[in-house]
Amino acid sequence: MARIASVTIPNDKVTWIALTYVYGIGQATSKAILAEAKIEPTTRVKDLTEADIQKINDIISNKYTVEGDLKRLVTNNIKRLKDINSYKGVRHKAGLPVNGQRTRTNARTRKGRAIAVGGAQPKAASKT
């Protein structure tokens, strides 16, 4: 198992896909890193040499913000928006969609499970 940017990436995958397991590296970035390191993207991770892995690690550490640093940066940005009470910060606080999506329908991922409105079902007759 190769470790890149302190993440263990799977051995049996193609290198450009395996690099996307690192938080902050997508498909385009992965291909750009491999092009700069002069490594064939379709090479399996288990076939990479230690020198290749070191090249990839150096490129990522010098040019990209990934994993813990990136997560901390995103968290701080959201915290700043909440502190200054911007519209986006208020939406983050309320757990609602931030970027103008509709909430009348949809938005279940952000809002959570739907809660039935009281009085919608007829009451069952009770014995007296």
Image: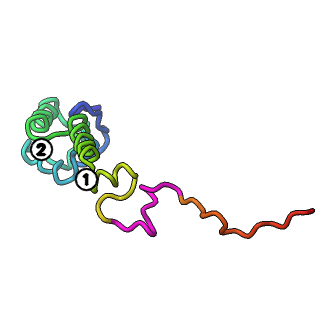
Residue at 22% of width from left, 44% of height from top?
77
Q: Is residue 31 above or below residue 57?
A: below
Residue at 67% of width from left, 66% of height from top?
119
* Tag of residue 39: 2
**C-alpha separation, residue under disc 1 versus residue under disc 2:** 45 Å
Regarding mark 1 in the picture, which secondary structure is present there?
A: loop
Residue 19 seen in this snapshot = no
Q: Which residue is tagged 1? A: 86
Which badge, 1 or 2, is on the more N-terminal residue? 2
* Tag of residue 13: none
Q: Amino acid at mark 2?
A: Ile
> Relative to the observer, which residue lies in front, 11 or 91?
91
Q: Position of residue 71 (x, y in %)?
A: 26, 39
Name the image quarter holding residue 66: top left
In which quadrant is the N terminus drawn? top left
Graded by Cα atoms within 10 Å as few (under 14), some (14 to 19) or many (20 or more), the crowding at tag 1 reads: few
Q: Position of residue 33 (x, y in %)?
A: 12, 45
Residue at 91% of width from left, 63% of height from top?
127
Q: Position of residue 113 (x, y in %)?
A: 53, 56
User: In the rendered view, does 51 fall on the left or right side of 113?
Assistant: left
Give the magenta part as a residue range: 101-113
Q: Amino acid at mark 1?
A: Ser
In which quadrant is the C terminus drawn? bottom right
Q: Is residue 112 above or below residue 10?
A: below
